[in-house]
Amino acid sequence: MLSVPPVLAAINLIQVFNTTDLVGQVLTVGLMLFSIVAWTVMFGKFSDLKRLRELNLAFEQRLRDERTLLDLPESFRARRSIPYADVYADAVEAYWRAASILKEKGIDSGRARLEHAENGIQRAIARQTLRYESSMIFLASIVSGAPFLGLFGTVWGVMEVFSAVSMQASANLQTLAPGVSAALMTTIAGLVVAIPAVFGYNVLLTKTRQLTTELENYSSALADRLELESK
């Protein structure tokens, strides 16, 4: 079986692109831009999640080395860019805020302070979960939308081919082939965008779920330590 050299294949793609109508060219170029953006988002998101996990583990190790959590220096609560630190800061600040209000009212309820701390933890978990999942909706949109854009371009191109053929007295393979191949180009472009994006999306979704589970486990352990220290 004869194989087409890569250079000739590239030339053929350029020729096919040049024979495509304006709609097909716009869709193809747009899909290629989507592909570049999708790859940028995937690499950036993967790097960001990896960095956040490393920061989380380092911060958690620092907390393990401390005998108490309620009286740590302000520097521990100032690092809001670290998800674990953000959860810790919300928990401790809610705890002491509740303690101050209850003291003014002459009430000393450890249970009430812990409930406020737990509420702060839940707010921080929700905020950091949204942070983990940021940009995922964009990838999901590309995964689901790119093939349909490619299909739209193909249907449009085929419609244009048959419209042109209907104006001619006769039609043969040589007449139909260029137009059909040009129409199929948008489908190829859509798949080139969607296939890598779906794999990248699944990898990032798994990573996001892992970090979310780790965040919830850390928050549970944090609540346990605060409860023990408040007694």
Image: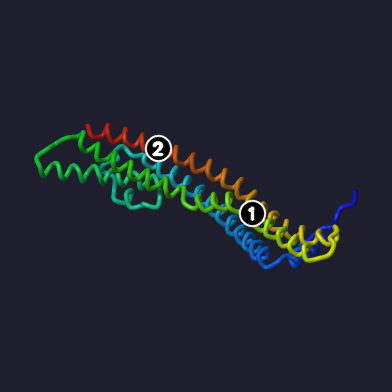
The residues tagged by marks 1 and 2 sit, at their Cα atoms, a distance apart of 34 Å
Q: Nearer the viewer, residue 146 or 24?
A: 24
Q: Identify the mark at residue 216; answer none if there is no mark.
A: 2
Q: Nearer the viewer, residue 69 or 223?
A: 223
Q: Nearer the viewer, residue 80 or 145?
A: 145
The picture places residue 69, in percent across and down from the top left corner, at: 30, 40
Q: Earlier in the sequence, mark 1 or mark 2?
A: 1
**Is the residue 80 above or below the residue 225 in the image?**
below
Residue at 84 percent across and 60 percent down: it is 171
Callout 1, which amino acid? Val
Residue identified by numbered label 1: 193
Residue at 45 percent across and 42 percent down: it is 57
Q: Nearer the viewer, residue 59 or 4?
A: 4
Quick check: 207 left or right of 29? Answer: left
Task: Check disc 1: other Cα within 10 Å, few if <14, some if 14-19, many if 20+.
Answer: many
Q: Which quarter of the picture shows residue 41?
A: bottom right
The picture places residue 136, in percent across and down from the top left corner, at: 51, 50
